[in-house]
Image (cartoon, rainbow, N blue to C red):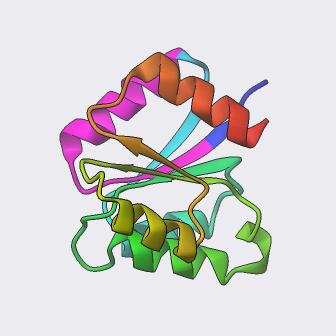
Amino acid sequence: MSLTVLAVDDSRTIRDMLKLALSEAGINLHLAEDGVHGLEVLEGIAPDAIISDINMPRLDGFGFIEAVRQQDKHRGTPILVLTTESAPELKARARAAGATGWIVKPFDPPKLVKALQMVAG
């Protein structure tokens, strides 16, 4: 099963790590640098899942998730938050915005792949 995933993160290092981890698992990955760019990339693809950071310039993860959820075709697309934050109130805010799950950085590549397969499968 080949998944298509959109990953939105302002850190080049994290984007590179995601590219390495997910491409090795045979996942078709699209990358964006912040929430605004993420929405632009999303227009041309139909991802099985989305990964989003929270702290980003221009449009943060909360705003990005809310904007994605306002689009009919992406209402049911799983969104995993990938962030250094672990505060319960931030998790609650992400859930309220429409996030499916929460993964704290640094991430374990096999666990991330497994999480994506679970939510998108």
Camera sees residue 13 = yes
Q: Is residue 23 above or below residue 54?
A: above
On the image, the x and y values in percent for residue 30 come to 50, 47
On the image, the x and y values in percent for residue 3 come to 69, 34
User: For this view, does 15 lie left or right of residue 22?
Assistant: left
Residue in view at x 78 percent, y 79 percent: 72
Q: Is residue 15 above or below residue 38?
A: above
Give the position of the N terminus as an image quadrant.
Answer: top right
Front residue of this view, candidates 7 and 96:
96
Camera sees residue 27 = no
Q: Is residue 71 above or below residue 4?
A: below
Residue in view at x 64 percent, y 76 percent: 69
On the image, the x and y values in percent for residue 104 come to 34, 41
Hey, which residue is sitting farthest front in the picture?
A: 88
Q: What segment carries the magenta color?
A: 5-24
Q: Is residue 83 above or below residue 72?
A: above
Q: Is residue 72 magenta?
A: no
Dominant secondary structure of the residues highlighted in magenta in the image: helix
On the image, the x and y values in percent for residue 96 come to 55, 75
Residue in view at x 73 percent, y 41 percent: 120
Give the position of the C terminus as an image quadrant.
Answer: top right
Q: Is residue 15 magenta?
A: yes
User: For this view, does 82 lie left or right of residue 4?
Assistant: left
Residue in view at x 47 percent, y 68 percent: 92
